[in-house]
Image (cartoon, grey):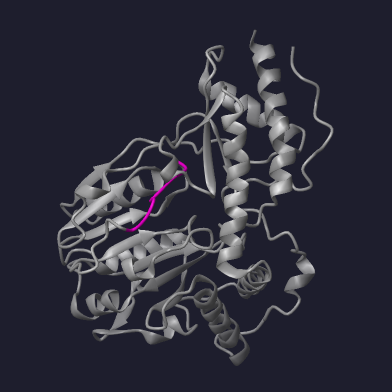
Amino acid sequence: MATQQPAVRPANPRFSSGPCAKPPTFDVSKLADAALGRSHRAAIGKDKLKAAIEGTREILGIPAEYRIGIVPASDTGAVEMALWSLLGARKIEMLAWESFGAGWVTDVVKQLKIDAEVKTADYGQIVDLATVDTKNNDVVFTWNGTTSGVRVPNADWIANDREGLTICDATSAAFAMDLPWDKLDVTTFSWQKVLGGEAAHGVIVLSPRAVERLESYTPAWPLPKIFRLTKGGKLIEGIFTGATINTPSMLAVEDYLFALDWARSVGGLNGLIARADANAKAVFDFCDGNDWITNLAEDEATRSNTSVCLKFSDDRIQDGAAFAKAVAKRLEAENIALDIGAYRDAPAGLRIWCGGTVETSDLQAMLPWLTWAFEAEIAAQA
């Protein structure tokens, strides 16, 4: 017999892995100062874009000599810009342990037609990082697998004296994990993830070594305008001071500025990491206390603190995919947890966002409902 519905409900049922929950203090009135109906090249627009760039540097602790640019098409656009502009100069190793990493492999191998060395791991696992030659090769990887719940445990495997570049998709890691900037040459993310910003804009961070590559190497293929970071063999510096390649949404920029202010209010990067860690721990502890659900990430050292992916492990479940969808549907129907089904290419299960904009109290209120939904679905299929 299924348990009765719990008495306490989450104040906010939004646990989507992207777009993610807005900061807890968000209200649309916070965006009243947006530079709407103004040119992004007017002084007010430039100032706000520059403030977004410098706020990013401040919160993430990005070194002063690194360039930060706001670019089109979310994290996807930022990654594609890096792949199309930088690859081809050296041998490449492509690392993939989830769908987005696999997508970058497709783009490099099938679209750019580069004979890269591809290393993959199943969902819930990670490649053997000790086999990666960062000393000599360019390496492309995701720091945190948004669709697999697996993250890089550290950067010890990246050589300090490397000659190649590290190109890191950090979209569900930035603002929730301490990224080692000295080990990263190109880093990309979108603010719709950990800070819950409005979508469509990406951020690309370039080390001096990445800039040197851009200014000394020209790819063999044509580059669309939307990917071009150089002109006449020199970096287009304006991109990294707020003169974006195409027209940005000033409403989205204002939303990001609000999110950065909220991040400061909770203690900056350390505060954001602590919030994500506390959220993830609530889910991990729940799994430890229930033998019918487990973390998809097999090694505790590689478990994400943002996109926590779970799988059901009960012998009574007849169809894993149908069961997981039914559980997620029950929770959505009760307005307890929205958008927590596993990613379409991932193993059947659930994916619960635990980034810093989520309140731990909401997770703690939601998890007993997960037990209720599980037991109700087990009873329904009996």
Horizontal arrangement in the rendering, residue 247 relative to residue 10 (left or right): left
Name the main secondary structure of what is drawn in magenta: loop
39 drawn magenta: no
Position above or below: 10 against 287? below
Q: Nearer the viewer, residue 174 or 196?
A: 174
Position above or below: 223 against 137? below
Position above or below: 77 against 233? above
Q: Position of residue 257 (x, y in %)?
A: 63, 74
Q: What's the residue at 52%, 17% (across, down)?
A: 319
Q: What's the residue at 62%, 33% (across, down)?
A: 286
Which residue is situated farthest in the right direction here?
A: 7
Q: Position of residue 113 (x, y in %)?
A: 19, 53
The residue range painted magenta reads: 148-155
- Snapshot quadrant of residue 29: bottom right
Quadrant containing the N terminus in the rendered view: top right
- Snapshot quadrant of residue 258: bottom right
Q: What's the residue at 47%, 47% (across, down)?
A: 146
Q: Is residue 192 visible?
A: no
Quadrant containing the C terminus in the rendered view: top right
